[in-house]
Image (cartoon, rainbow, N blue to C red):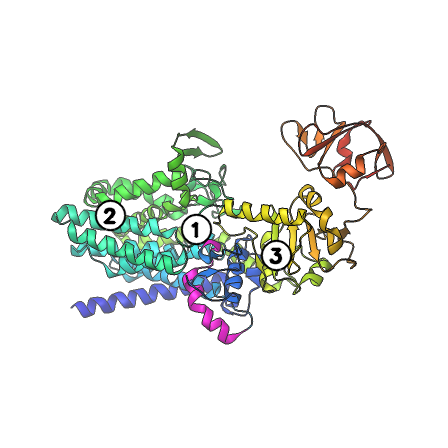
Amino acid sequence: MLKIQNSRKWHLFALGAALGIAVFLLIYGTAPLNVANDSFCRGGFIEKDIQQHYAGWLFYRHSALGWPLGVTQAVNAPDGVSIAYTDSIPLLAVLCRPLAAALGGTFQYFGWFTLGCFALQGGFGALLCGLFANALFAQLAGALVFTVSPVLIERAFRHSSLGAQWLVLAALYCYFSCRRQGRYASAGLFIINVLAVGIHPYFLPMTYAVTLALLLEYAVTHRQWLRPAALLIGNMACTAALGWALGLLYGTATSGGQALYGYFAMNLNALWNPIGVNGVLYSRLLPAQNQVNGNYDAFAYLGLGVLAALPVVLVLGRRRILSCLRRHWALCLVCAVLTAFAISNTITANGVTLATLPLPAAAVKLFSVFRSGGRLFWPVYYLLVLTAFAGLARLPKGTLWVALFAAAQLWDVTPALIQRHDAMRNAQTVAEFPTALTSSFWQAAAGRYAHLESVQGLQADSLQLALWAADNTMTTNDPFAARYDEAALAARRQSTLDALAAGTLQSDTLYLFEDEGAFLQAVEPVKDAAWCGRVTSADGRCSWYVIAPGLQGQHFDALCTPYDADYPLRLADYTDALWNRGVLDSTRKTICFKDSPFARARLEGAAYLCANGQEYPILEIDDHDAGWLMVTLEIDDATVLWDEELTTK
């Protein structure tokens, strides 16, 4: 009998997995499965995050293998960082590295990984539905709802590693299976918890919450605490061991330029708000709702089928549901905690922040380890979907109701599926990857330097810049990883500035500045040993301020402005309550520049500031505010000087 049951489970899993594969192929086609096709990685599918994931893999692939296995020294150089913090799926990167080396050339694994996620989503979705419905058609209809989940579609190929939402479904399946069998020990849950750390750490609190619920309910019911506690400790030890091997505990990469806990919180309208990133709408009927801050990252639209089914199920099955809640009290408890964490202390509804509850600084720092806290709602999200399915399946003619439920869900989200299909198709037809690095300067610098030093700030088009550096087997300190040590980076940057001030250049290093003022403060002592100047994108939206040793005297295209006697002045792009892009709002006659030897040399003794053939008399130069030069002009409205190249006379 046990063999028959296991055979049926494998059969159901296989059918669900086939359904997931079919959904993947219909949405994305076969192009992402070509490991030599990286167009959707370089171009940025839907948004640019996948460029970060792919760049992390390229840096890792081309760097020396060491310990921990998942660390690359090419990023956050010279300290290195785990590619878990570039969301490059570290476990898969480690496993694919020998294969990529054997095949040579372009190799991306994100397509096959995402196909696997859809297959496993369908497989575990079918198994989960099989616990609550007997009819095969109903089980597969439920699996379809899980496979076209808006949350899964929103993450696939955008935040690639977060597409592994099958981990949550698998954890829930193991939980309900063990509860029915009166067991606490689950090899499946054990493995899921360990795998989660190798895919994305955000899954850890989700899968461990389900595990903890199972162990607590067993321990309380059977009054046996020692063995469940020992299992939990052993599971956590194995998870930590894999995390250590992949470098998640490596160094001090625990901070970074991201918002703190509460910014990426879940809006109270998330369950019925169908708006995804970049305006993708997941509903044919429901309109987009307002949201604030980083609410977009807590996207949790249930779909019209689930939203329509839940009230019916809750009313008709209220007694059964109350009994179920009492029986699964620990699961309800951890779900309540996950929901509270997802909503955070910054409570938002539509476009309004209702309240900001005070938290100790230590708690904010601790919670910011999972600063995108809205994601932790996913176990509750899938339990709501399961509740809708299970409630309908128990009704008379349950299979028919489930079929209508699945049809309504699919009909509702189909426009978003079509949009994702078109986005992947378009990614294959782009003649050139959309990048701002088109100047002849980048061609001259390619292959010449071993290191890209981001001296100050986060560079414009930083992810394409990271891809360029990775393609040229360079190392970089550019902080494009999700976690890095801000204090250590600041110290290294100050050391670089000190070396530049002393006239010392590393010949194998390309120096980049984000801000022109910082560049002008640093460039004078080294200007004769490097090509120095401004490089822009063709559309003028991106600018880099460059010190390129060994290229002095070379001439590049019109996108490059060399630092020489003709280098222009520009307003400091400074805005606050008083200043608007470097112009004092109250009078519009005073402008500001970053203080530098260059700016002082241009302004000292000058009588006029000139732009577009016009001369504006200089009335006063004020340097009492350290770091700034404020210049008052005889001019009606100095905003005409925005973005202009200025000279003096």
What amino acid type is highlighted by mark number 2?
A: Ala
Residue beneath disc 1: 150
Asked if residue 86 is among those painted magenta in the image, a careful observer would answer yes
Q: Position of residue 406 (x, y in %)?
A: 37, 54
Residue beneath disc 3: 452
Q: Is residue 526 above or below residue 471?
A: above
Do the residues bearing badges 1 and 3 touch, measured as CB atoms within 8 Å? no
Does residue 426 appear in the picture of this structure? no
What amino acid type is highlighted by mark number 3?
A: Leu
Tell whether 364 sits left or right of 644: left
Residue that protrudes farthest toward the front in the picture: 502
Helix, strand or loop at label 3? It is strand
Q: Find residue 127 and report its image quarter.
A: bottom left
Q: Is residue 159 above or below residue 574?
A: below
Q: Closer to the observer: label 1 or label 3? A: 3
Residue beneath disc 2: 213
Q: Which residues are magenta?
A: 85-104
